[in-house]
């Protein structure tokens, strides 16, 4: 199950990528912009792409497991 669809903090004003991963505590999320274009945790956003419980996507926000998917 996907717990949340997340658009991460591009300016790191609230959390760093490490803080975000710590808060998740292994829960599965769908993270938008993890390739770094248009947002995400700059400059180390690609770190999220290597985490098993993170489903990454590009700049096209989708809900792969949404009701109408």
Image (cartoon, rainbow, N blue to C red):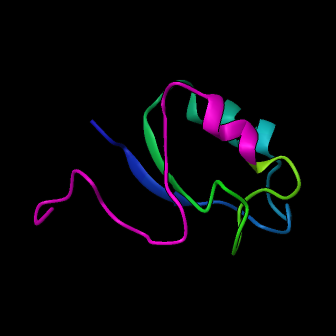
The N terminus, quarter of image: top left
Q: Is residue 33 depicted above or below 43 in this figure?
A: below
Q: How many marks?
A: 0
**Left or right: 25 as drawn, with respect to 10:** left
Instruction: Name the quadrant containing residue 36.
Output: bottom right
Q: Nearer the viewer, residue 65 or 57?
A: 57
Instruction: Name the quadrant containing residue 63.
Output: bottom left
Residue 13 lies, in percent from the top left, at: 86, 65
Tell me the chief SS of the magenta region. Answer: loop
The residues colored magenta run 46-69
The C terminus, quarter of image: bottom left
Q: Nearer the viewer, residue 23 or 31?
A: 31
Residue under the image location 64 percent in, 29 percent down: 50
**Left or right: 42 as drawn, with respect to 50:** right
**Left or right: 30 as drawn, with respect to 41:** left
Residue 68 in magenta stretch: yes
Residue under the image location 62 percent in, 38 percent down: 49
Residue under the image location 79 percent in, 52 percent down: 15
Residue 32 lies, in percent from the top left, at: 54, 60
Residue 5 lies, in percent from the top left, at: 43, 57
Instruction: Name the quadrant containing residue 21.
Output: top right
């Amino acid at each position: 199950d996907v717990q949340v669809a997340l658009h991460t903090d591009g300016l790191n004003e609230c959390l760093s990528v490490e803080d975000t991963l710590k808060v998740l505590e292994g829960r599965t999320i769908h993270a938008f912009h993890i390739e770094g274009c248009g947002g995400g945790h700059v400059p180390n956003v690609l770190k999220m792409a290597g985490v098993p419980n993170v489903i990454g996507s590009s700049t096209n926000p989708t809900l792969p497991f949404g009701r109408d998917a």
